Amino acid sequence: MRHISMVFIVMIVFTSGCAHNRAMTPTVASPPPTSPQNSETPPLSENQKPLDGKNDTSDFSDKDLDALYAEAEAGVVHVADPIAPLNRAMFYFNDKFYFWVLKPVARGYRYIVPTPVRTGAKNFFYNLITPVRMVNCILQGKFYSAGTEFTRFVINSTVGLLGFVDPAGNYPMLKAKEEDLGQTFGNYGIGNGFYIVWPFLGPSTLRDTFGMAGDLFLNPVNYVRPAEAALGITAYDKVNTTSFYIGDYEAIKNASLDPYSAIRDAYIQNRRKKTKE
Amino acid sequence: MAHLAHGAQPLDELKGPIEQVINILRDPQYKDASKKDLQREKMWEIARKVFDFEAIARGTLTRFRWEGLTPGQREEFTDVFTEFVGNNYFNKIQGEYHNEEVVFLKQEMLTESKARVMTKIRRESIEIPVDYSMWMRDGRWKIFNVYIEGVSLLGNYRNEFERFLTNSSIQDLISELKKKVERQKKGEIVEK
């Protein structure tokens, strides 16, 4: 029993912090090309040259068209998905978990708890995982940003009443730097590996999974004992975060033909952007 | 409302329409359920001016695919895709508007007729970065791509449609999108 609860805790703890953003979006350098059998992303026919552009009726100039196609191609992602059937099953599970459990709970919570309180809780958890961001800034050689994180932490933990208020947020130069170990690995040139959907945690990749596991050591919630308390705290954080994003996941689903693939591609694009920053 | 090419800044040409849409969303005269269609119509009017739907639809297909379409298919695809994307967006903002605000951060000129405008949506205490790629066409700045949290709208649909077209025809894609639009109109929310 205890063992099972620990596994659950590890899963839930993974979710905190980045999980929500991840659910909607997030990674990096294209992985090595994979055979179509292994990848759900089919090879695109980018290099197939148009036979002729004469039957074109619209008024796009060649320059416009080049710009348009370059823009679209910049957003094309390839990620290996060798365990797609398993990932789809996990996606289905997370989807049901969202609609049957998380969303109703978060919606009720949102109805009862006023925005300032939810915001305070959000700020508190965000401040609490400063070590994750700061250490990863250092690992990436971003010392100035690491200093900013430290300053933010000091201000928000004191004047900001243990982090519930975000006075540092009033200063643009004290903007938080969203770094995590997955991005650090990406920064070192490590590719995504392949796509993984974790139960409760949502989209990830092989690289980001190792990243999440490493970042756990820097998340204070993970050191709360008994473990059941840590689980409760993390679940609360998850519900609180979700209360700000109700409706977004639904919108993404509605906007796609195959939500599983659309969310996978969006995750990879979002992580690529974050790693570049 | 005639915009002259000279001096019109992409950020301003984006800001005007977005603020108009927000005003329409907040306008109490549309509060009644029977006025929602009218409200939607007003928002479409604005969107059509500032979004280059013709370009966005075209960019979701590769150059090669587009060349293979008949003029009729091109038009049909552009129309249904425009309706699909627009309705998704309006369903979302009409369905649950939580006093979101749009903050216009800055514009970057990439060439003299191409720019990127950075904004963020503020909802309660969270912020969602939304960037717009804009170009000058027909004498005004128009949006031809949107990035939400770094995810490119054009790129994501390009991925989806190419994947779909690997095993299916363009007619299948068009009818799939039509089916989706029908469901949107009935107000069905996909929950599975």
Image: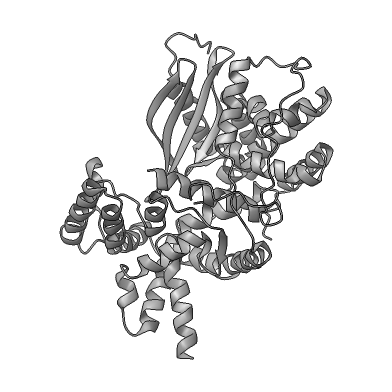
Nearer the observer, A127 or A145: A145
Question: Is residue A203 among what the camera can see?
Answer: yes
Q: Quadrant of residue B142?
A: top right
Residue B144, percent from left and from top = 57, 28
Q: Is residue B85 left or right of residue A74?
A: right
* Above or below: residue B96 compared with residue A68: below
Q: Quadrant of residue A96?
A: bottom right
Question: Is residue A112 among what the camera can see?
Answer: no
Residue A54, percent from left and from top = 76, 14
> Which residue is at 42% across, 39% downward?
B120
Residue A85, percent from left and from top = 69, 65
Q: Quadrant of residue A155?
A: bottom left
Residue A100, percent from left and from top = 60, 69
The scheme the figure's colours follow is one colour
> Which residue is at 21% across, 46% downward?
A144
Q: Is residue A166 left or right of residue A118?
A: left
Q: Is residue A63 left or right of residue B9?
A: right
Nearer the observer, A248 or A179: A179
Nearer the observer, B127 or A150: A150
* Above or below: residue B13 compared with residue A106: above
The C terminus of chain B lies in quadrant: bottom right
User: Total number of numbered labels?
Assistant: 0
- Residue furthest to the bottom in view is A1
Q: Is residue B155 left or right of residue B165?
A: left
* Above or below: residue B17 compared with residue A216: above
